[in-house]
Amino acid sequence: MGRQHAVVVVVIVGVWVATASAQTRPYNVIMKDVASAFAGLRKSVDASDLAGASDNAGRLEQLFKETEDFWTKFRTKDAIDAASGARELSASIVAAAGAKDAQKMRTAAGGLGRFCTTCHDSHREVAPDKSYRIRP
Amino acid sequence: MDHVTPRHRGTEKTFGLFLGVLESRCVGIILLVLALVACARLSDAQTTASPKPPVVKPDELASEWFIRLNELDDWHISFDGKEENQAVVDRFLELYADEALHQVGPSATQIGPVIFHGKDAIRRWADDFSKRYVALNYRVEYKTRKEKPLQPFYVIQFPWGGTGASTQFEAIFTNRDDRRQFVVPGAVFFIFDESGKIDSLRLYLLRDEATEIA
């Protein structure tokens, strides 16, 4: 009984730590990871590398979830919509790659960039030193 | 006086006459100077009795309020998710006197007049306003006659000191949450104290006349 309780506590703490660390990742770090995964996805799609595309799209799906969570606390609809749209499209790339449907995968990957553009137009500001800032 | 010759006596008489004229002219000049000094003092006394003209014009103060109101959306979210609007809110509050009144219309969940008294209360309003709207553009309505456009402020010098200003404006703003953009006509009435701080402000927004920009 005591052992079972200990396992439950460890699992709960583990989930809490994982959730908390995911929520507290700085936004610029998330965006850099998105840029890296997005570049990897384009390379995989161009090379018709289904496995590589699936990996990168899966990573993007997770990153766009983090992005969505960041904006959800500010209730900013356009940013939440963009992040959730990108997340869903990333999931569809994973599914297309899994189904070995290269055409569908290519089409879906081609549409991903518009979600980035929509959000960046409203919420990304380039400072004079070329660094980025987040607009509300 | 024994050594004075008749010739000398004539000179002495002329000199005495000259001194007499000079003396009477000096007295006249002194009297004139005294009169001028008296007038100047009287004028100074009258000037200090009347209220001093304002250091800054009320229309310029009102115009500055619009600038700082529109700056309330000019802030950023930090990478760790903090809303960093305090600097623009502080700048907005600099325009208000410590015991200022700031009256606005009720929100969707309120009824009746909504009055914020004092800087702490006005800070809450400004903080909420700053986080609620983006793309703020409150602009004084243009009046055009004879091909001459003007953004008029109606100003008054109060007899008790301080000034007032009012104007009509168009509030253009975007809701931060749903990104819907509106134009709403409004009017604002300021009372400034003698130091140029806002003593009282009444803000009217005619929400019934709001137009959504598609």
Image: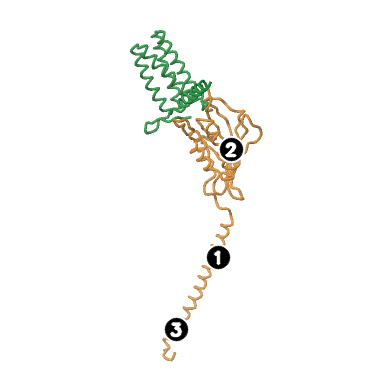
Chain colours: A green, B orange
Amino acid beneath label 1: Ala
Give percent across and percent down for residue A108: 42, 13
Picture quarter with the N terminus of chain B:
bottom left
Mark 3 neighbour class, 10 Å CA radius: few under 14, some 14 to 19, many 20 or more: few
Q: Tell me the SS state at disc 3.
A: helix
Say which of marks 1 and 2 sits in front: 2
Q: Tell me the SS state at disc 1.
A: helix
Mark 2 neighbour class, 10 Å CA radius: few under 14, some 14 to 19, many 20 or more: some
Q: Which residue is mark 1?
A: B38
Q: Which residue is mark 2?
A: B188
Mark 1 neighbour class, 10 Å CA radius: few under 14, some 14 to 19, many 20 or more: few
Amino acid beneath label 3: Glu
Query: What is the C-alpha distance between the residues marked 3 and 1?
Result: 38 Å
| Dots 3, 1 in contact, CB < 8 A | no
Q: Earlier in the sequence, mark 3 or mark 1?
A: 3
Say which of marks 3 and 2 sits in front: 2
Q: Tell me the SS state at disc 2.
A: strand
Q: Earlier in the sequence, mark 3 or mark 2?
A: 3
* Chain hosting mark 3: B
Q: Earlier in the sequence, mark 1 or mark 2?
A: 1
Query: What is the C-alpha distance between the residues marked 1 and 2?
Result: 47 Å
Work out whether disc 3 and disc 2 sit on a shared chain.
yes
Give percent across and percent down for residue A118: 45, 22
Q: Which residue is mark 3?
A: B12
Give percent across and percent down for residue A133: 42, 31
Horizontal side of residue B85 vs A128, given as left or right: right
Count of numbered tags: 3
Whether residue B157 can be seen here: yes
